[in-house]
Structure formats: structure tokens, C-alpha cells
Amino acid sequence: MVTLADVAQHAGVSASTVSYVLSGKRSISASTRERVERSIAHLGYHPNAGARALASSRSNIIALMIPLRTDMYVPVMMEIAIAVATTARSHGYDVLLLTGEEGPAAVRRIEGSALADAMILMDVELDDDRLPLLREAARPGVLVGLPADPSGLSCVDLDFEAAGALCAEHLAGLGHREIAVIGEAAAVYERHTGFAERTLSGLRERCRELGVRLLHRPCEGSYASVAATLARVHDERPGTTAFVVQNEAATDPLLALLRQQGRAVPEDVSVMAICPEQVAAHASVPLTSVAVPAQRMGRHAVERVVAKLRGQAGDGVVLLEPELTVRESTGPRPAPAPD
Amino acid sequence: MVTLADVAQHAGVSASTVSYVLSGKRSISASTRERVERSIAHLGYHPNAGARALASSRSNIIALMIPLRTDMYVPVMMEIAIAVATTARSHGYDVLLLTGEEGPAAVRRIEGSALADAMILMDVELDDDRLPLLREAARPGVLVGLPADPSGLSCVDLDFEAAGALCAEHLAGLGHREIAVIGEAAAVYERHTGFAERTLSGLRERCRELGVRLLHRPCEGSYASVAATLARVHDERPGTTAFVVQNEAATDPLLALLRQQGRAVPEDVSVMAICPEQVAAHASVPLTSVAVPAQRMGRHAVERVVAKLRGQAGDGVVLLEPELTVRESTGPRPAPAPD
DNA sequence: CTGAAAGCGCTAACAG
DNA sequence: CTGTTAGCGCTTTCAG
């Protein structure tokens, strides 16, 4: 194994000089720097991570806790995780992958062992039991998601209220007066993950302002349950001309069912979704949608945590602005059927 | 920060004793052990990861390289990654998440910096440029996937040939004589990722043995392209009574199209898939399928790599046996339409 | 069964 | 601009 001492000897300088060439923490004459760099390349030197961490008490690792249950929003999680990993690398950090399994113990473990310099928690719940620990922790942390009480914490999330409002505006702008929301599974609302409720409240408020009638129904992901929900909406609000879907698994069944019923999208009925771009773009009818900006969220979380490590940022909530992409699934309200 | 020395002092023993209590590498009297453990709990001691890595030259970290392009098989990747993380934890290892972005350089970096004790590479391509480095590396590695030349490497993968054969047998057993395969996008075959070809060859061989006609058509994930492929199959082999789908994105469109054409599944036509359980179980008609055993693959990869770290395992390819789950999408061949 | 002590490879004062 | 040196916290011989 090639050590810093080997490099120093080869370059005919002291160990500290090599160290400083690497860290740039003090000025080095061009000639020495060059000699050292040549030696490093020649010997194929890589600094030892453990030694570095011990001496500097910084590991250059960011811990990322992802949820264990993989039943929801998997591609989004994955996209965030990948964005976190690549952004972290571009800032000189590696990423340690932790699953929710360990729960709060993981926070303690990371903190105690100094394995990571900071942590990013995904899929935070409204009342997450890792939060008290995180507030006390010496190391900075950033949440992806928004808990009930974000005080003393840094959070990044999509502005779901704004996303809801955006949907309402888009459909109202097309003339729709009765909208139905196909929501997440009831369990999601009961678990109070927050985002679903926030979307709904944005939607409700803006609909009220715009004088649009809104109906909300939670829905499981299965084909059968989408069918049941659709039937129910049809019974309760036959005048519904537009759907907002916030349920990744429900979009395809919904489109299939409408097609089956001979209701053309968007001529007879408009459909829009709050979902990952991929899902929206690849649906059987490309969906007008508000995207969950997974990459931006991951990138932002890392940048935030890195800034905090440098003492350049404090706590606070950052809500990313939603963006609406108009595709082929929404159109003007059809003329009311003549009696 | 609580150090080992603090614990030693509190317990009235030497540092090495504490260390040995922790590692169990030499016998300790019950009374000292108890005292030490009490002190550890009392002080809330956690060993410092960097110091440990430096002194022992083992980091207790396994690096996991996941592919950067997330266009394919995302839930499977995620499931493998999570299985890797949880299994690793249960063996005392943490997982470092690397993306494919760095390419071969990542292998060198991990190796050089001693950041991880071993690595697991996902989504290996037939002729992957990280493989030569991995063969020379001092640290053990395990591939998830099967490259063209697995010599000198450890690999874990699904036995896709057997999976193909299993499909052929199942359908032949139900009396089907003409089968069509809806395959992955042409790009997947061109990239020679291996698994698609292997499935096909298993399918072909067993079909030949069983006297079943087989037609294979690659297919993009979009609704339109599934429609086109289906039409083409119908033209070329009107007698086709069963489909094997190896393309996560094609299953739902296929079922929707068949429904639209008034062909009932499984009464008029059988459909089976090689895909994750979730996809199969939640399809609009629950699909008879051969699963990609993501969890098993992740777990196996970790166990393999841990065994190698202990010098208890060598190179070689392990192909996991596929399992067929019969659901509602396959049935006996319909009686040939009377002329 | 337990202690003492020598590093592991690097960083960061402290000196010049 | 560069060198000397004292640790960082832990593991692991070597002694007893």
C-alpha cells in the first residue's frame, strides 16, 4: 500500500507538504507541487479514508436513510437516491446507504461512530421518531419531506399545496367546473405522511376561489378499486369532467377504464396527474402532470447539507416550486350533453 | 466524545480489555465483561469508525455500485439495493452507495482509499470495463448479473435460461402450441446485457423439445409500440394462443389491448410474464409469472461477499433457480376456432 | 485471563 | 513557502 510518507520520500519533501498539496490549505510553490503531483501519479497514491477520518474527524461521508417499505413511490425514491449520490460525489462526499429498519438507532449509531459527517432522511413522517435525535445531533441533517413540526430542522420538499393549486388552475382555465380527485390509498392518509393532505388542501382552496366543485376519493392501486372509485364518482357527481390523480398506480387503470367506457381523453374527460415525469410521459395517453422533481430534491438536499457542514446555512423549510407540463390528456370542458 | 479510554477508566480496566470485550477475540471473565458492558452502556460509547478502520485496516463497509441510467427495472434495483443494505447490516457491515457515473475509476478509488472492504456491482454488462480492475483487486467483489467471461469473478444472477424453459413448460403443459414472446426493447438486445438473450435461448430450446412454435419480437415500452407488436404477431402467427412477456412496461398495455380486442385472458389467450412479483400481482389480470428474485439476489450477493472476506468462499457463478407462480392469466389452450 | 505499548496513515498546530 | 511533531481512537502483538 502506498502511503503519504512514500509519496513524500519519493518527491523529496515532508509528509505535511504532501498533505497540504492535497488539501490546498496552504500555498505551495509551483515546483514542489508539481514534483509531489508527479510522485502521486507515479506511485498511484490514494489517501487512506480511515486515517484521514481519524485525523481530521471528518469522514467525507453523508448518510442517506431510505424507507424500508418499498411499496410506494419506488422510482421517485431511487431517483432521489441517485441524485443524492452523484451530487454528493461532485462535492467530494460519498454516500452511506441506511434503511429505515434500524430506525432511530441508526441516527445514534452514525452520530456516535462518526461514520458520516451529516445525514439526509427520506420519507419523513409527520411525527417521525428520529426527529428528536436529529435535533440534538451535533451533525447536520436534512429531511426530504415535511414533518408536522419542522422547527430546528432543515427540510426540502415539493410544495404540494402549490401543486394542488396549479392543477385546479389548469383545469379551471380549461373551463371545467366539476373535478374529482383520485387520491392515494386510504392508508396513506391515515399514516399522515403529509404530502397527500397538503395537495388536497391546495386543491380545495383554489377550487373554492375559482368556484369549482371538488370531490375527493382515496383509492387503492388495483384495477378493481380504481373501477369502483370511478363508478362511485360517476354516481355521486355525474357532471364531473376532469380528474386529478395523485396515485402512481391508478393512472393506467383509470385511462384503461375510461377508454373502455368510450369516454375519450381529453375530448370527453380530462385527466391530469401528480406523479413522476416518467409515469406521466409513458402513460397510454401522455398525461398533463405536475412532476415530483426527484432530482432537484436530491440535489437540493445535498447542497443544503454541504452548506450546513461549512456553516453556511441554517435550518428552515425549502419548498420546491412545482412545474406543470401540459401533455395530451387535458382539454377544454366538453359542451354539456343536451338533455 | 466518549472514547475507548474513557470506558476503560470508568470500568477500571485497560483499553485493550475493552477492545477485546467488544471484539470477542479473547476470553474475558464474566465479571470484567459485565463491568465493561455496564460502563459502555452508561457512557453511551460507540467505537469510532475511522480509528477502527485505521487500526484494523477493515472498514466494515461494502460498496454497492448501482447503474446510473434508471430507465429500466427500477423497482428491482431498489429491492436489490435494500436487500443488500439490510443483509449487510445483519452481518455488521454498512453499505456505501456508488453510482455507475464514476465507472472504473470508482473501483480504483475504493480499492486505493480502503473505504470499503469489498464491493458488489449491479447491472454488469457482458463486457464491462470494471471487470479487469475487479479481477486484479485485492478486495473481494461480487457481480449481480452475468458477464460474457465470468472467469476469476463471483457472480449471482437469476437462471434466465431456466426461467425461459419454465415458461415454455408451463404453457406447453396447458396445451399451447404457438407462443409469442414480447421482449425487451431492441436496444436491450443490442446492448447485450445478456439476460434477455439467455431467457430466449432457454425458451427456444425447451419449445423445440416440446414441439411448440415460438415467435420472438422485441418491443418498446410504450402503448403504441405494444399495439404494433401485437398486430404484427397476429398477422404473422394468427394461431398464437399464448404470450410470454419479458418487458415490465409492456404487460399492462398488452392486457389492455387484448381486452379491447375482446380477447379474454386466460380463456381466449394466455399471458405470462418474467417480471417482479409486484408487477405481476398488481396487473389488471394477476399474471402467472416467473419472478426476478430481487431480495434473494441481494441477500445472496452479500452473503457471498462476506464469506469471501472470511476466506470461506471462492469465485464462481451462482444461478438462482427461478420460481413460477401461477395466477389468473394462464389457462388451457382454447379449442381452435371452427372454420 | 489481563495490561502495556507500539503503531495504523493522516492532519494540523507549531516552528522556522 | 516548508519541515517537525504530536496526536486522532483503536487493534494487536508481546509480556505476564
Image: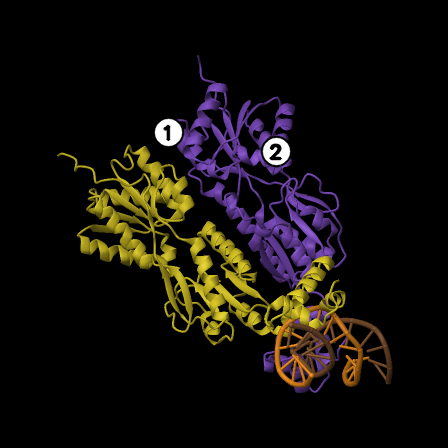
Chain colours: A purple, B yellow, C brown, D orange
Q: Are marks 2 and 1 on the same chain?
A: yes
Q: Secondary structure at mark 1?
A: helix
Asked if one can make out residue A27 in the rendered structure from this viewpoint, the answer is yes
* Residue at horizontal 54 percent and vertical 49 percent from the top: A68
Q: For marks 2 and 1, give the one nearer the viewer.
A: 2
The percent position of residue A164, horizontal first and vertical second, equals 60, 33
What is the residue that sits farthest to the left in this orientation? B339
- Kind of residue at badge 2: Glu
Label 2 is found on which chain of the structure? Answer: A
State the count of labels: 2
Asked if one can make out residue A268 in the rendered structure from this viewpoint, the answer is no
Please tell me how crowded label 2 is: few (under 14), some (14-19), or many (20+) other residues with Cα within 10 Å: some
Seen in the picture, residue B192 relative to A225 is either above or below; the reply is: below
- Kind of residue at badge 1: Gln
The residue beneath circle 2 is A197
The quadrant in which residue B96 appears is bottom right
- Front residue of B37/A279: it is B37
* Residue at horizontal 53 percent and vertical 69 percent from the top: B107
Please tell me how crowded label 1 is: few (under 14), some (14-19), or many (20+) other residues with Cα within 10 Å: few
* Residue at horizontal 19 percent and vertical 46 percent from the top: B177
Residue B309 — which label? none
Quadrant (top left/top right/bottom left/bottom right) for the C terminus of chain B: top left
Seen in the picture, residue B210 relative to B22 is either above or below; the reply is: above
The residue beneath circle 1 is A260
Determine the CA span between mark 2 and mark 1.
31 Å
Label 1 is found on which chain of the structure? Answer: A
The percent position of residue B197, horizontal first and vertical second, equals 32, 59
- Front residue of B220/A10: it is A10
Q: Earlier in the sequence, mark 2 or mark 1?
A: 2
- Residue A282 appears left or right of A317: left
- Residue A7 appears left or right of A261: right
Seen in the picture, residue A260 relative to D10 is either above or below; the reply is: above
